[in-house]
Amino acid sequence: MDSVFYIFSGVCLGCFILRTVFNILIYREHRWAKNKMVYRGILVVMFVLWASWFQMNFFDPLIIHIPNLIRYFGLGVFIAGVVLFILSHLQLKGFEGKGFLVRKGIYSKIRNPMYLGFILWVFGFPLFMQAFITFLSGGIWVAFFVGWQHLEEMELEKKYPEYNEYIKNTWF
């Protein structure tokens, strides 16, 4: 069973690396970043990434027994992360390609609510599942999210002159 965990961990890490390469291509305005087939491939990579990450929780070889209060706190953190992610996605519907910076709703307080949602769930769900190694791996995944966020913000600074002012009035 331990080998299954490590296989899912490797797949998850590989997918994070592929997604990061794609973000770098976007930032460098490489022609592959604009290719629809590559974009669809990245969507598949993201699905595999999250499917493998969830499986890591179920096959984690080091289960820690923690009080139910802490476990359910982790579940609450996970749910808050999922809700934040979904709400931020819904709020962006219809704004793609419109040529302006979205600064309403969640985006009026948090610059990157999707990434914050990811961070909450990569720590919350393993805590609920008592999956110790997966919980610790959250530090690796957060490093990727912060890197993605940095690349995205550098792109937005180039695209929108008002972005620097927006940064001063928002968190994360």
Image (cartoon, rainbow, N blue to C red):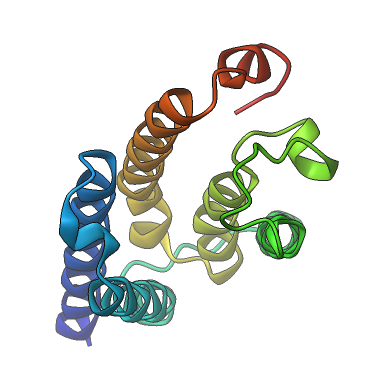
Q: Quadrant of the N terminus?
A: bottom left
Q: Is residue 139 above or below residue 150?
A: below
Specify the quadrant of the image occupied by residue 39. Answer: bottom left
> Residue at coordinates 67% horizontally, 62% vertically from top-left?
89
Q: Is residue 99 above or below residue 47?
A: above
* Residue in front for this viewpoint, 99 or 103: 99
Q: Position of residue 113 (x, y in %)?
A: 65, 45
Q: Quadrant of the C terminus?
A: top right
Answer left or right for 72 relative to 50: right
> Residue at coordinates 70% horizontally, 22% vertically from top-left?
170
Q: Position of residue 150 (x, y in %)?
A: 38, 31
Specify the quadrant of the image occupied by residue 95. Answer: bottom right
> Residue at coordinates 62% horizontally, 18% vertically from top-left?
162
Q: Position of residue 146 (x, y in %)?
A: 40, 36
Q: Is residue 102 above or below residue 85?
A: above
**Numbered marks: total:** 0
Q: Position of residue 33 (x, y in %)?
A: 25, 58
Answer left or right for 120 relative to 7: right
Specify the quadrant of the image occupied by residue 125. Answer: bottom right
> Residue at coordinates 70% horizontally, 34% vertically from top-left?
110
Answer left or right for 161 relative to 28: right
